[in-house]
Image (cartoon, grey):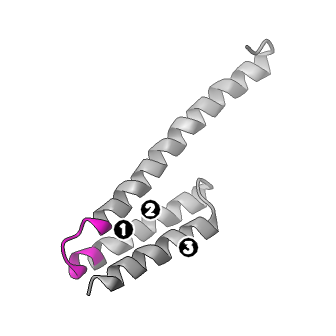
Amino acid sequence: MAHHKSAKKRIRLSEVRRQRNRYYRAMMKTAVKKVKEAQDQTTATNQLPEAYSVIDKLVAKGIITRNKAANKKSRLTRYVNSMA
């Protein structure tokens, strides 16, 4: 266990950040799931910009990397296009 005051604070802060990151990742998973669970292509296409928005926000916050975001968006788009 940490003895220094600064080390104790670091433990507290890292826990807060971990919880926040988990919340945002869950938000992204939900947005992606909405697109994938859409019954037809038009519904999925309407959900796509919302998913893109969430993914881009996570990049801006530094929770996921640009490459991971690009990969997610590309795969989602490919999935929606294959529904036709």
Q: Quadrant of the N terminus?
A: top right
Image position, residue 67 (x, y; %)? 62, 69
22 w.r.t. 37: above or below = above
Magenta span covers which residues?
35-44
Q: Main secondary structure of the magenta part?
A: helix
Q: Secondary structure at mark 2?
A: helix
- Cα separation between marks 3 and 1: 15 Å
Residue with the mark numbered 2: 54
Image position, residue 6 (x, y; %)? 78, 22
Label number found at residue 70:
3
Residue with the mark numbered 1: 50
Q: Residue at x 52, y 66 (%)?
A: 56
Q: Amino acid at mark 2?
A: Val
Q: Which of these two is toward me, 40 or 23?
A: 40
The quarter of the displayed image where residue 77 is located: bottom left
- Cα separation between marks 3 and 2: 12 Å
* Residue 79 painted magenta: no
Q: Residue at x 40, y 52 (%)?
A: 27
Of callouts 3 and 1, the N-terminal one: 1
Q: Is residue 34 left or right of residue 54?
A: left
Q: Which of these two is toward me, 75 or 56?
A: 75
Q: Are marks 1 and 2 in contact (CB under 8 Å)?
A: yes
Q: Amino acid at mark 3?
A: Ala
In the rendered image, the residue lying farthest to the front is 82
**Mark 3 or mark 1, whichever is nearer to me:** 3
Image position, residue 29 (x, y; %)? 40, 55
